[in-house]
Amino acid sequence: MNLNESFRSAWTGLSANKTRSFLSALGIIIGIAAVIAIMSLTRGSQQMILESIQGLGTNLIVVTPGKWGGAAGRVAQKISDLFTIEDGERILSKCSAVKNVVPTVSRQLLLQYKDKNAQITVNGVTPEYQSVLNFWVERGRFIDDEDMKASRSVIVLGQNAASDLFEEEDPVGRSVTINTALSKYRFRVIGVMESKGQVMFSNFDDQTFIPITSAQRRLMQIKYVNSFYVEAKDEDSSDEAVKQIDAVLYQKYGDDEKYNIMSQEEILSTMESVMGIMTIMLAGIAAISLLVGGIGIMNIMLVSVAERTREIGIRMAVGAKRADILLQFLWESIFLCLIGGAIGIFAGWLGSRIVGAIGGLSTLISLDAVVMALGFSMAIGLFFGMYPANKASKLNPVEALRYE
C-alpha cells in the first residue's frame, strides 16, 4: 500500500464515525485554543505595555528612595531623610550626560468643582516634566518658571480628571478646590493634557499637575520630594548618566541601597522578563489539557483497533503489510490532532478577540505561535498514536479473522 492509499484509508476510518472523531479531538481543540488565547492576550498586552513605556521617551531614568540596613534587619527608609530639590539640581549640574531633572511629589487628594468631586492624584512637578516624560498639553498651557517662582495656585488636568470634574464643560480658566486634611485651596485650571492612558501601573489621564513649589509649601507642607525623572542627553548616554547619578548620590548618602536608579532600558527588560515568565506559566497550565487530550486520543484509538480487528485481519489476508496497518492508524491519530489543532487555533483566536474586546486588551497572534501549535498537535498525534498503531500492526492475521 502506498502513502496516498494510507491517507485515504485513514481518512475513511475517521469519516465513518464523525461524532466519535470530533469528541476524540475535543481535548486537543480545548488545549490548543487555551494556549493560543493565552499567548495572544499576553503578547498583545506585552506589546501594548512596552509601547506605552517607550512612549515616555528613549532616554528616561527614574530615581527613587531605597532602603537602609539596621541591627534589626532591613527596613524602609524614611523619605523625609532623603531626596530634596537641591539633590536634583546637584545631579543636573554635576552629571554631563544628563539633560533635564524633574523632581516630583504626589498625593491622592479630593478635588471639587461645583457639585462634583473626585479623588485624584495631584503631582507637584517642574516645567520640564512635559519634555522629559514626552507628555504634552492639548489645551491651554503647562506650568512655567513664573508659576514656580511665585508658587502660583495653578493646575493642569489629565483627560479623565477633566471629564470627571467638568464633563463637557471647558475647564481652562475655571477654578477647582483641592481639599487637604488642614484646609481647602482654590487652584485655577490653566491646561488639559493630551490623552496618554495607562503606562505600567499608572494612568496618566487620571492625574493632575501643579508647580512643585506650590505642592510643597501649600498643599503638603513638606521639604522632600518623592522621586526624580531624569532625561539623559540621548539614548546612547543613558548608561553613562546612570553611573554619574550613582556617583553624585553615593557621595551624599554613602550607601547605594538608600536610592534606586532605573533606566528605561532596565524597565523594559524587567517588563519583558516578567511577561515572558507569565506567558510560559500560563501556557504550561493550558498544555496540561493537551496532555489529557492526547491520552483521550490514545484511548479512542485503542477502542478503534479493538472494533476493527476483523477488518485488520482481512486486510492482512489480502496482502497488507504490518507497515501499512501501522501507517493507517498512525495517520488517523495525526489527522485527529491536526484537525483539532486547526480548530483550536481558530477558537483560540476568536476567544482572545472576544476577551480582548470585552476587557479592552490588545491581542497579538504571531506566526511562530501558530506553527508551534500545529507542530505540537502533530507531535501529540505521533506520540499517543504510536502505541495503538503498533498494537494493530502486530495482530495475528488468523486470530484477527476469527475475531467477532
Image (cartoon, rainbow, N blue to C red):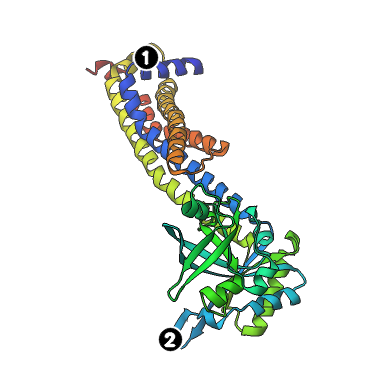
Q: In this rendering, is residue 199 above or below 368?
A: below
Q: Is residue 2 visible?
A: no
Q: Position of residue 231 (x, y in %)?
A: 69, 64
Q: Position of residue 59 (x, y in %)?
A: 69, 60
**Residue type beneath disc 2:** Ala
Q: Is residue 264 visible?
A: yes
Tell which residue pokes out farthest to the top in this image.
Answer: 318
- Which of pointers 2 and 1 indicates the residue nearer the eye? 2
Q: Which mark is residue 203?
A: none
Depth check: give the residue in front, 86 or 176.
176
Instruction: Tell me the residue that label 2 is attached to.
Output: 72
Quarter placement of the C terminus: top left
Residues under labels 2 and 1: Cα distance? Answer: 81 Å
Residue displayed at 44% across by 46% down? 283
Label located before the other in sequence (2 or 1): 2
Q: Position of residue 343 (x, y in %)?
A: 43, 28
Residue displayed at 50% across by 16% down? 4
Q: Which mark is residue 315?
A: 1
Q: In this rendering, is residue 120 above or below 80?
A: above
Dot 2: few (<14), some (14–19), or many (≥20) neighbours within 10 Å? few
Q: SS at mark 1?
A: helix
Instruction: Tell me whether the residue at label 2 lies in contact with that at label 1, contact meaning CB atoms closer than 8 angstroms.
Output: no
Q: Position of residue 207 (x, y in %)?
A: 53, 59
Depth check: give the residue in front, 22 or 126.
126
Depth check: give the residue in front, 69 or 135.
135
Q: In this rendering, is residue 328 above or below 72?
A: above
Residue displayed at 38% across by 25% down? 393
Tell which residue pokes out farthest to the left in this image.
Answer: 404
Q: SS at mark 2?
A: loop
